[in-house]
């Protein structure tokens, strides 16, 4: 006999939850267009700054690093003043950061992307909004996280080809300035209209109540478990950043046009967006930690494929395969934290872990550029990324084994 309605586990999910999720996706799709300007214009920017790719690569890196560090601070602030105010501030900082970066000096590029657009801009959006969305969902949290964390891939599908044409027509500096103004004009109204306080979990137990505060996680002290999560996320994000940040330049080194390279980047990120929805569906069924292991394994295999060919058609296929492989990892880490730790600790645990994730993205993007400057080609960078990926699999495999010995209750809120 089916349980009576009053016996059904109560849920915070509603139609409003999905309105919030789709709006956050739109915000992130615009916010992540700014860093793509560096990816598409890497060689012109390097030419204007002395022909060293490490400088624009470092700007891309500090944007990720700043967003990760800013997410910790701004996530804490959002928990006290509300996510709407923080998001409005972030929109203004993205515009200010791209305006400063557009002035053309190396320090302006680094400060504009690292401090303003990164720390205060995307830092006010990515981690705080992912945490915010988890509070609107309990039954389909993995699916919702897969959707909203796909903003970078939606941006990668929409913007590279358009940015390549704008840069060719107006130059990279004017393109940065115009995109910053556009981002503020889109993000600020969405944040003001849609971002309101999340629902209060229903009392009385059920799926709205998560793990007990202070309890061991996977049989270990909770902070140790989080530290292992964070280290693993850093290691998997080092290779994750390399093709995304250097694909256009990699193609032009092989004699493939920048236009085709930008199209290849769009294919990679479109495949990632589509696959991320599948990974979200998987995560809702097998849990976040197991999904991390599967996604990281797929990333290691697809990363190795970049070393196997220089043919344009095959590189399009490899880009699509790579996008299919790595796309589910980051939201699955977030889901695993929400499954294993109390909801009351999400506002600082999720941004802290994402800080290490984005630090890995930052290091990977810079390291690939530095290795290219030293060796003159990208194979050593991709090989180093594969080594980092294998180290990640060792840690995640250990955590999965611990879960088998100390299986938690996946009752989250």
Image: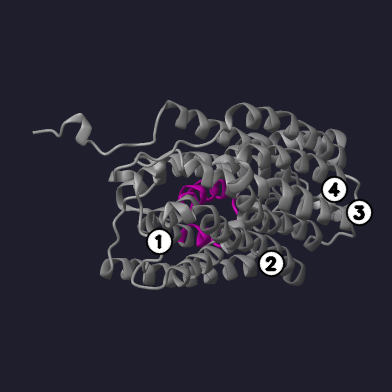
Q: CA distance from mark 4 to mark 3?
A: 8 Å
Q: Which residue is mark 1?
A: 213
Q: Main secondary structure of the magenta part?
A: helix
Mark 4 or 2: in front is 4
Q: Which residue is mark 2?
A: 367
Residue at left 82%, top 50%?
A: 112
The first of marks 3 and 1 along the sequence is 3
Where disc 4 sits, the SS reads helix
Position of residue 15 measured from the top left corner of the image (x, y, whole percent): 43, 26
Is 351 drawn above or below residue 3 in the view shown? below
Nearer-the-camera pick, 125 or 265: 125
Q: Which residue is mark 3?
A: 105
In terms of image quadrants, where is residue 213? bottom left
Residue at left 81%, top 60%?
A: 55
Position of residue 412 measured from the top left corner of the image (x, y, whole percent): 36, 49
Whether residue 149 is visible to the viewer of this picture, yes or no, is no
Q: What label sits on residue 101 in the rendered view?
A: 4
Q: CA distance from mark 1 to mark 2?
A: 39 Å
Residue at left 49%, top 53%?
A: 346
């Amino acid at each position: 006999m089916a349980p009576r309605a009053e016996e059904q586990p109560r849920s915070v999910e509603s139609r409003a939850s999905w309105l919030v999720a789709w709006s956050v996706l739109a915000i992130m799709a615009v916010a992540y267009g700014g860093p793509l300007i560096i990816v598409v214009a890497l060689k012109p920017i390097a030419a204007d700054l002395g022909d060293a790719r490490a400088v624009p690569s470092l700007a891309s890196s500090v944007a990720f690093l700043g967003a990760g560090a800013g997410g910790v601070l701004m996530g804490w602030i959002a928990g006290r003043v509300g996510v709407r105010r923080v998001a409005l501030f972030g929109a203004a900082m993205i515009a200010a950061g791209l305006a400063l970066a557009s002035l053309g000096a190396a320090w302006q590029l680094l400060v504009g992307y690292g401090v303003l657009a990164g720390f205060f801009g995307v830092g006010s959006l990515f981690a705080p909004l992912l945490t915010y969305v988890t509070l609107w969902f309990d039954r389909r949290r993995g699916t919702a996280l897969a959707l909203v964390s796909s903003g970078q891939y939606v941006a990668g599908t929409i913007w590279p080809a358009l940015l390549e044409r704008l840069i060719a027509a107006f130059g990279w500096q004017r393109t940065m300035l115009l995109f910053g103004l556009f981002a503020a004009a889109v993000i600020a109204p969405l944040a003001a209209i849609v971002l309101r306080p999340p629902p209060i979990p229903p009392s009385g137990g059920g799926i709205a109540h998560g793990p007990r505060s202070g309890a061991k996680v996977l049989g270990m002290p909770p902070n140790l478990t989080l530290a292992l999560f964070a280290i693993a996320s850093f290691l998997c994000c080092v290779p994750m950043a390399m093709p995304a940040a250097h694909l256009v330049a990699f193609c032009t080194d092989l004699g493939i046009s920048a236009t085709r390279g930008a199209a290849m980047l769009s294919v990679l990120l479109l495949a990632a967006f589509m696959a991320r929805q599948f990974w979200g569906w998987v995560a809702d069924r097998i849990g976040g930690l197991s999904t991390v292991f599967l996604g990281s394994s797929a990333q290691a295999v697809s990363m190795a494929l970049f070393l196997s060919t220089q043919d344009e058609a095959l590189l399009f296929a490899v880009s699509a395969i790579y996008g299919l492989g790595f796309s589910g990892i980051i939201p699955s880490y977030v889901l695993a934290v929400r499954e294993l730790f109390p909801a009351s600790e999400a506002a600082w645990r999720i941004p802290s872990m994402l800080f290490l994730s984005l630090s890995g993205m930052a290091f990977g993007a810079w390291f690939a550029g530095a290795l290219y400057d030293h060796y003159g080609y990208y194979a050593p960078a991709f090989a180093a990324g594969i080594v980092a990926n294998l180290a990640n699999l060792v840690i995640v495999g250990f955590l999965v084994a611990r879960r088998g010995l100390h299986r938690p209750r996946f009752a989250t809120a």
